[in-house]
Structures are given as C-alpha cells and as structure tokens.
Amino acid sequence: MEIIIKPDYDAVCNEAAVMIQRAWQRKNSLILGLPTGRTPLGLYRKLISLYKKGEMDFSRITTFNIDEYLGLEETHPQSFAFYMDHHLFQHINIKKENIHHLSGRPDDIEEHCRAYEMDIRRLGGIDILVLGIGVNGHVAFNEPSSSLASRTRFEALAQESIKANAHFFKSEKEVPRFCLTMGVGTFLESKTILLLASGKDKATPVAGAIEGPVTASNPASALQLHPRSKFIVDEEAASKLLRKDFYRWKYENRDKIADLM
Ligand code: PGA
C-alpha cells in the first residue's frame, strides 16, 4: 500500500487528478471506477479544469459507477446517475456510450448485476478505481459485514450511511434503504485503487483500514490485499495513523526508493 498524506482536501484532490491524468497520458485511454458523495467533488472539479485547459481529453475514457440507490430514477436529483452527470459528465467530452451506471430500477437485479460485471470484464477491467470511505469503513455500499469476496449485488444501507447521506435529502426518512453496489471482490480486480479521505470523521475508519486487521467489519481494510492500492488522505483523516512518519518518509523518498529497485 502507498499512504500519501497531503496537507488538505484540495491537495488530496489534486494528487488524485494528476495520477488519473498521467495514467491517461500513458495509455491514451482509461477505464475508471467512480464514486459519488462529498469526497470526489474536488477531484471532479480538477478533472473538468484539466479538460477545459486542453490538458485532458475524455473521448477514450470509459467509466463505471460503483453504486446506486435502489428505487430512484436516473433523473432523480439524488440518484448517483444524476450526480455524475451534474458534477462531471456534462462538463467534459466523455461519450455517452462509455458511461456505465448501475440502474436504480432494474427489471431483474441479479441479471443486471451479472451483466455489469461482464461489461467490466469485456472491456478489460478497471484501470483506476477511485473510492471514498464511509465513517463506518464502507467502500461504495459495501457496509460492514460485506464479504471481502463479494461481487456486484443488492445491499441494505447501514444506519451510519443513511445518516451520513441524509443531508442530500429533505429528511433522513427519504434516504433509500437499499442499493446496488459493486463488491469488494470486484474492486480487488482493479489494476490500481485510489482511496481518498478528508476530514477528522474519517480518521478512525482510515486508521482501521490501513493499520487494523483485514476484516469485513471495516470493508476498506480489504485494500491491504491489493498490490497497487493508494490511500490519499489529508492531515485530519490521517490523524489516527500510528506510523505517519514512516509513510511520509517513504512518500518523500519515493523516487530514490524506485531507483534502488
Ligand atoms: P462522503 O462519503 O464522500 O460523502 O464522505 C464517502 C462514502 O460514503 O464512501
């Protein structure tokens, strides 16, 4: 794992945007797994700005969103499909056919989830998966107790997630109780994983994910099983890490270390 501690939220978003831009420059095409929520908003603003400056082109970029509320139409302002369009897609030159969402109203849930996994595989797998982390350690809607081998599926939202997402709705009662989410096992097949976290309410789940045991009680801890997972966190989200100095030293000396390998 690479643990990158940045001074603040803006620097976290910048680091992630630069990593995505560099990967795109190397390959000229890219398959991204993308989250919603508050955390990625700054990253999306930076990607839009790179596009507007002519420093990034999305015409050969494909995206897969990592989860969706069940019961909401794509046009519902709180659906993740709407969020993605509003905060990213309508501002860049991504092709409609390259955007993949889980549906909030699938005819057949199992078949829909199976087809989503097939699409990811058919296109060659996710190059960069971007994740946030919930206050309870969830990644996408893989709530605590999610199997670390889980695939794309139906899930129930944990109470902490309902509470955390309530501010997007008129009241907590309106937050959907169920969702579709890519699974932890699906995530672990991505080539690179970037988990972004900002703020002190993420300090406990981040510390558990990096320095605690690998456990379904903190699904983000599954990233310990991935050979190219990077946590990009700000000082507040890093505040409960015990080995901060070591992580900082490794990051600051990454070029020298690479030369030795
Ligand atoms: P947030 O959500 O970015 O709104 O804090 C993170 C998550 O639930 O994964």
Image (cartoon, rainbow, N blue to C red):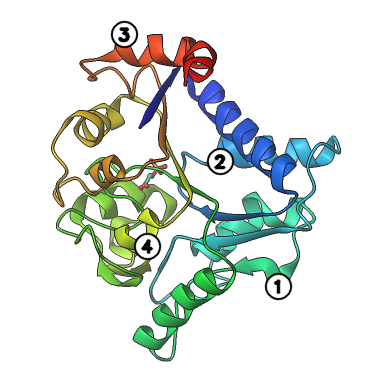
Give residue 159's position: percent from left, percent from top. 19, 55
Q: Taking 81 as reference, is 204 above or below it?
A: above
Q: Sort mark 2 into few (<14), some (14-19) or many (20+) by Cα contacts within 10 Å.
A: some
Q: Quadrant of residue 247?
A: top left
Residue, disc 2: 41
Read off the residue under disc 4: 186
Q: Nearer the viewer, mark 2 or mark 3?
A: 3
Residue 245, disc? 3
Under circle 2, the secondary element is helix
Q: Residue at x 59, y 57 (%)?
A: 84
Looking at the picture, how far across and down is residue 102, in whole percent? Answer: 48, 72
Going by the numbered disc 4, the residue's amino acid type is Thr
Residue 172 placement: quadrant = bottom left
Can you tell me whether the CB of the residue at mark 2 lies under 8 Å from the nearest atom of ligand 1? no
Foreground: 132 or 174?
Answer: 132
How many angstroms separate mark 2 from mark 4 (CA)? 23 Å
Front label number (2 vs 1): 1
Instruction: Please tell me which of labels 2 and 1 falls first in the chain.
Output: 2
What residue is disc 1 on? 97
Q: Is residue 192 above or below residue 236?
A: below
Circles 1, 4 touching at the beta carbon (< 8 Å): no
Residue at figure coordinates x 40%, y 81% from the top left? 114
For this orientation, the residue located farthest to the right is 54
Q: Residue at x 28, y 45 (%)?
A: 225
**How much space separates mark 2 and mark 1, taking CA atoms?**
23 Å
Amino acid, disc 3: Asp
